Image: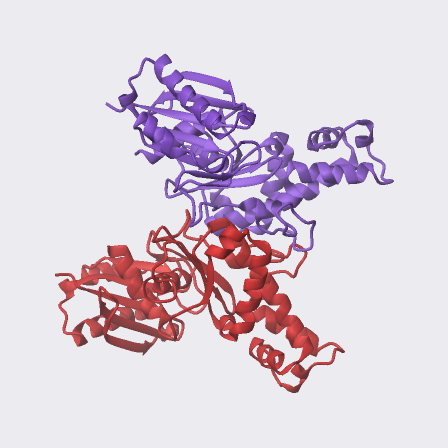
Chain colours: A red, B purple
Amino acid sequence: MKDYVVGVDLGGTKISCAISDLKGRVIAQSTIPTLAEEGENAVLDRIIKSIDTVITEAKVKTNEVKAIGIGSPGPLDSKKGIIITTPNLPFKDFDLVKPIVDYFSIPVYLDNDANVAAIGEFMFGAGKGTENMIYITVSTGVGGGAILNGKIFRGSTCNALEVGHTTVFPGGPRCGCGNIGCLEAVSSGTAIGRRANEAVNSKVETSLRNYEKVTSYEVFKEAEKGDAVSQKILDEALTYLGIGVANIIASFDPEKVIIGGGVSKGGDIVFKKVQEVVNERCFKVMSDNCKIEPAGLGTEAGVIGALALAIMESE
Amino acid sequence: MKDYVVGVDLGGTKISCAISDLKGRVIAQSTIPTLAEEGENAVLDRIIKSIDTVITEAKVKTNEVKAIGIGSPGPLDSKKGIIITTPNLPFKDFDLVKPIVDYFSIPVYLDNDANVAAIGEFMFGAGKGTENMIYITVSTGVGGGAILNGKIFRGSTCNALEVGHTTVFPGGPRCGCGNIGCLEAVSSGTAIGRRANEAVNSKVETSLRNYEKVTSYEVFKEAEKGDAVSQKILDEALTYLGIGVANIIASFDPEKVIIGGGVSKGGDIVFKKVQEVVNERCFKVMSDNCKIEPAGLGTEAGVIGALALAIMESE
């Protein structure tokens, strides 16, 4: 019986790997450094070694493993199993799936971080029990993944839910992608940090100036303490996040929008503002039907998502 | 053999009905006035009569009809088969599907105009051969429908693709829905007409003043003749339409966006501008992959879409 799956969370600094049963109950786990500087094939070998390790440790036979799921930063082509490029990994147009399939003779599924997180939340996190669910991560960048009718929806070029690059402020700042007024350019942790540094470098009075280095973390901290400038910066960033979420609700009509990533750790202030904007901007029937919640999985989200990917795709 | 389907296009002024084979080839057709003022049951009777007429005219037996598709203005609940309300028809929380199922003993599928148009374009119009396709209608209002993985995607409350009420201009004019800066409030025919009338009632020099009544039609006409004010009004409206389309492409990653409705009849000026904005704002891999095209079905789109709905849902 093929009662097990393996999940691999491929990151720039570490490779996390786990084996679980088909309900996602982890039996064995391994984390090793990525050592990205050693190049494509060395990292591939380390991935294979990780998978081997957890299968052995779990005392499972290779032919009892139903599928392997791999979550990786993108852009990547999950249909072809190819990592196109990624800033912190050595892979360039690299077929990651085929050599692993060849080695283990097990189906291997590759997907990007945001989709994997969406699948993880859907199966084991805050999205359990939904049919249509959107996951949005607000961190250095802003990304997303969609579960529609109980399945991951990837779109035609595997780039669906590039929600970070939807326009929410046409006259706004330029985004790293080249466009103007992207959600990522106004609501990401990076954007909040940039606004904070603009304030620090201006004549405005703000307690943010007490720090040597200011990031979004300090803005949340000082806003809570009552710094008006920090509150204003957050209010603006979260209003645009609310607009982005409202647009996603108007487009997908989901039962749940789950927000993860560093900025979501801001807690109540984030979810209150986003909900307020959504109530203002969405049709009542849709906003009443759609819950906006923080991600349910913690630091292990990546590897749990990869297990969920393997389970979903091999069903 | 169940080799036929019936399609009904329910409008405020007329009920169009057709019977076709499973490839959408129409065998018989009927159009009668709606006479909405006669009330719910009278209109229901006229719908049933229409269906009876085309089945009889086509010399088909009722048990050879596989399904009946009905397209209606919304909002409606296609899962429950209920028309919630609609401005030009007498139905209020009216179960339209059950009495027709009871009468004919044939499965009946109800959906809103925009979804029905999307299905029609997907099966028989500009969307043929795609897997993921978005239909947007830009007319008095702005609406849409999505075909994802070859099926209509309705969302959790049957309101997916309320693209007209996505925010594209946060500081913009108030929309009829109550929100500020909706796509519909800046890019619909109504919005273009309103901007034109603002110009006419101001001191600006414009040839729009030569008309007794100004709508979006005159704006397109005068823009083509070189009126700078008309050109400016269109450029603004179409830029926002481009932003709305770009956001839809970033969200759904479709192979095609099909634009129908009155404004799309503006032709080249519309599609050139929308394409320009999309090229500017979307990831190249997605904009290169996604064609933006005018709707392929003409005045019969409603009834052909209803036939397509019956075919798709009964497959």
Foreground of the two, A65 or B20:
B20
Picture quarter with the C terminus of chain A: bottom left
Picture quarter with the N terminus of chain A: bottom left
Which residue is at a point 47% across and 22% down the rendered structure image? B16
Q: How many marks?
A: 0
Q: Is residue B247 left or right of residue A108?
A: right
Can residue A176 be seen from the camera position used here?
no
Does A213 appear above or below A110?
Answer: below
The answer to which quarter of the image holds residue A280 is bottom right
Give percent across and percent down for residue A51: 24, 70
Give percent across and percent down for residue A296: 39, 70
Q: Is residue B274 left or right of residue B19?
A: right
Give percent across and percent down for residue B220: 70, 31
Which residue is at a point 31% across and 28% down the rendered structure image? B106
Which residue is at a point 73% across and 39% down the rendered structure image? B194
Give percent across and percent down for residue B186: 66, 44
Foreground of the two, A54 or B18:
B18
Can residue B15 be seen from the camera position used here?
yes
Foreground of the two, A229 or A160:
A229
**Residue sitting farthest toward the right:** B203
Does A4 appear above or below B162?
Answer: below
Does A68 appear above or below B228?
Answer: below
